[in-house]
Amino acid sequence: MSSVWYLSVLCLLCPVLGENGTRPNIILLLMDDMGWGDLGVFGEPSKETPKLDQMAAEGMLFPDFYTANPLCSPSRAALLTGRLPIRNGFYTTNAHSRNAYTPQEIVGGIADSEVLLPELLKKAGYVNKIVGKWHLGHRAKYHPLRHGFDEWFGSPNCHFGPYDDKQQPNIPVYRDWDMIGRYYEDIEINHKTGESNLTQIYLQEALNFVGKYGSTKQPFFLYWAIDATHAPVYASKPFLGSSRRGLYGDAVREIDSSVGKILESIKNMGIAKDTFVFFTSDNGAALISAPNQGGSNSPFLCGKQTTFEGGMRVPGIAWWPGHLPPGQVSHQLSNIMDLFTTSLALAGIDPPEDRTIDGIDLSPVMLEGKVTDRPIFFYRGNEMMAVRLGLYKAHYWTWTNSWEELSQGINFCPGQNITGITTHDQVEHDLNPLLFHVGRDPGEKYPISVLSNEYQQVMPRISYVVRQHKESMIPGEPQLNVCDLAVMNWSPPGCEKIGKCLNPPESKPWKCVWPH
C-alpha cells in the first residue's frame, strides 16, 4: 500500500488546523426571521449592512442557502443535529402539513436520543457557549447544558410578552444553569418605542467568550442565536431611528454593527485564521409582521411559514481569512443542516454513523471550489411539500394558510397572490408537480407547462430522487404534539434563588392545535 495514499485517507478526517496548530474555532451566527433580501450584498436598496457586506467580500457568499423548515424551532433542531425535523422529532402529526414549534405550553423538546453538535465538539476538546434563543424545549430535561453546551446566556423561548405571571408566566432569561430574571420584569423590551439593550448584552457575551478563550489553544464553539429581528422587534437607543427602513431596519443595523465588532475582535486578537464563522437565519422574513416588524425576502415568493423560496431561502456567508479566498460566490445548493456536518469536518470529527445525517460537508466547496449535486427538500410539518434539484424546483403540495385565517388578516404572502400557486387550500400536485426554473423565475410565478419538453425531461429525475427519499424515510417520534399549561415557565431552575418561582396550574394535557 502506498504511504501517500494511506496518509491521504487518514487526513480525510483530519481537522483543518489553524495558525496556532489547533482545531479551528467555530462561530455560528444565527439570526431570527431575517430575510434573504435584508442584506445589501443581496440587493437591499438602503445598503445598511456594511459589515455583513464586508464579511461577504472577505469570504464566501452562498446565494442558494436554505433552512430546513420555514419556522424557528424545527430549523434550529435541524442545524444542531444535521437532520431534517421529521427525523429529529421536531414536527407534529396532529394535522397534515402543520408548522409546529416550542411555545411555553409545549411538553416536548429535543430528544435525548439526538446527538447535538456541541456534544460531539465537546468530546474533541471544544468549550461551547450558546448566546440567545435555545427554542428546543424549555423544561429542565431539555436544558442546553444537558446537550453539550458549557455556558448559556439567553432564553428558552421567544421574547413574547409581557404576561401577568398568573394566566401565563413571563419568559425566563438564563445564565448557565439558572434563570436570572424574566423578560419585561428584569430585562426591558419597550413595545411602544422598540427600545431594548438585549442585542448589546448578547454582543458583550460573545466578545467576553471570544476574548476568554481566543488567547488560549483551547478551541471554542460559539452559537450566537439572537432574536432582535423577530417580532416584537427591538433595538438599543443609539440605533433607534437610524434606518430608512423603520424599526426593523434599526434592528438589522444593530446586528450588522455587532457582527462587525465580533469579526474585528477576532482580527485584533490575531485568531482570524483560526476561526471559522458562518452567518445565516433560521427561516425567511415574517411578512405577516412587515414592514414595521418584519423584513424582506425579495425577490422571492412569500415568507416564513411557507415552503416557497421566501420562506426557506436565507442569507449564507462563510468567513475564514487565510483559508477562504475573499470575494467568492458559490451556487452550491446548501442547507442549514450542512453547518453540523461541516463543523464536524473542520474539527476532524466523524459524524454519527448510527443514524441518517442530512447535512453535507461544505468544506470542499469552500476550500476547493467544488460543487456537489444534491437535492434540497422542503418540509412543512409531516409533509414533503417541494424539492429543489439543480435550478429546478417541484412543488408536490401548495398551501399558504387557510381561507379562515386569511379572512382574519393573517397573510403569509401579502401582495403576492398567484392563482393556483399561493393556495389557501392544501392542494396536492403529486401527479403533475408544479415545476419552476428558479434561475429564470426566482419568484416562482411561471410554472413550466406539463406538456413542454423541458418538463418531460426534468421531472423523471426529480421524481426518482423523491421516490428514493420517501422510501428510505423513517420519521422520528413527534415531539410537538402535546401541550399543557402546567409545563410553562412557572418555576425554572434557579427561580428560588431570586424569588421568581410561580405556582403552576393543575396538569391537563391536550393535543396541541397548530392552525397553519
Image (spheres, helix red, strand yellow):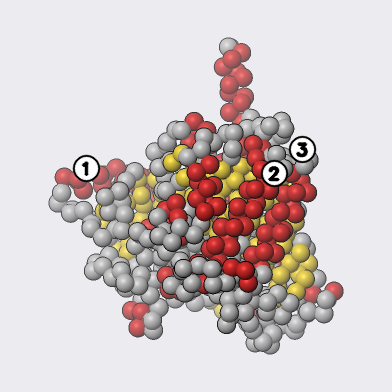
Residue 75 at least partly seen:
no
Mark 1, residue position:
457
Q: Please tell me which residue is depicted at 66% across the width and 38% down the height of the picture.
A: 274
Q: Give the residue displayed 36% in from the left and 52% down from the top.
A: 387
* Disc number placed over residue 268 in the picture, else none: 2
If you read the primary sequence from the N terminus, does the residue marked by circle 3 or circle 2 appear first?
Answer: 3
Please state which amino acid type lies under the numbered disc 3. Answer: Lys
Quarter occupied by the N terminus: top right
Do the CB atoms of the residues marked 2 and 1 lie less than 8 Å apart? no
Point out residue 510 in the picture as x, y percentages from the top left corner.
56, 79
Say which element carries label 1: helix
- The image quadrant of residue 344 is top right
| Pointer 3 residue | 217
Comes first in the chain, label 2 or label 1: 2
Of circles 3 and 2, which is in front? 2
- Say few, some or many: other residues with alpha carbon within 10 Å of mark 2 (under 14 / 14 to 19 / 20 or more): few
Residue 381 coordinates in the image, percent (x, y): 46, 64
Q: Is 106 placed above or below 404 here?
A: above
Identity of the residue furthest to the right in this view: 497
Secondary structure of the residue carrying numbered label 2: helix
Identified by mark 1, the residue type is Gln
